[in-house]
Image (cartoon, rainbow, N blue to C red):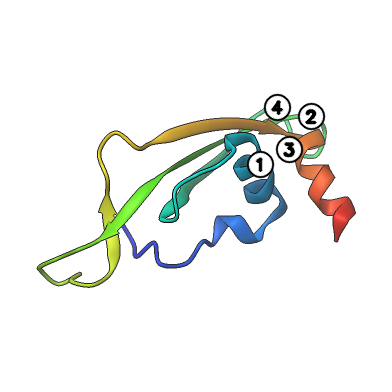
């Protein structure tokens, strides 16, 4: 797993829509997976996103990096084009 220091998915409309649907999340919660389930993302496909709380490694080559997924914190959310378009229109 790569370093989850930055909230990369949260910069994009699909990440913003997913986080909105998830509601309040802990400070170190990061989306780490996003994928289209089909049929076509430009029409009305559904997107699945997963996130979890991460903590910094205490030892090893990743010491100090936010790379350790906290067990029991993983959450999944499904969004569609309508959810995503809400954030495209804001920009």
Q: Secondary structure at mark 3?
A: loop
Does the residue at mark 4 contact the one at mark 2 (Cβ under 8 Å)?
Answer: yes
Q: Which residue is mark 2?
A: 44
* Vertical side of 53 occupied by 36: above or below: above
Image depth: mark 1 or mark 2 in front: 1
Badge 2: residue crowd in 10 Å (few <14, some 14–19, many ≥20): few
Is disc 4 surrounded by few (<14), some (14 to 19) or many (20+) residues within 10 Å? Answer: few
Q: Position of residue 83 (x, y in %)?
A: 76, 37
Q: Earlier in the sequence, mark 4 or mark 1?
A: 1
Q: Quadrant of the C terminus?
A: bottom right
- Mark 4 vs mark 1, foreground winner is 1
The answer to whether residue 64 is above or below residue 90 is below
Label 1 vs 2, first from the N-terminus? 1
As measured in the structure, the alpha-carbon distance from the residue carrying label 4 to the one carrying label 1 is: 23 Å
Identify the residue position indicated by label 1 in the image. 20
Q: Residues within 10 Å of mark 1 (few under 14, many from 20)?
A: few
Residue 32, disc: none
Residue holding disc 3 = 41
At horizontal 45% and vertical 55% (from top left) the residue drawn is: 27
Q: CA distance from mark 4 to mark 2?
A: 7 Å
| C-alpha distance separating marks 1 and 2 | 19 Å
According to the picture, the residue beneath numbered tag 4 turns out to be: 39
Name the residue: 35% across, 37% down.
Answer: 73
């Amino acid at each position: 797993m790569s370093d989850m220091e930055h909230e990369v998915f949260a910069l994009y409309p699909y990440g913003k829509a997913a986080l909105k649907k998830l509601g309040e999340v802990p400070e170190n919660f990061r989306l780490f997976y996003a994928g289209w389930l089909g049929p076509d993302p430009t029409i009305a496909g559904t997107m699945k996103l997963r996130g979890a709380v991460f903590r910094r490694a205490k030892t090893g080559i990743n010491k100090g990096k936010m790379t350790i997924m906290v067990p029991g914190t993983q959450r999944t959310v499904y969004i569609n084009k309508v959810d995503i378009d809400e954030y495209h229109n804001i920009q």
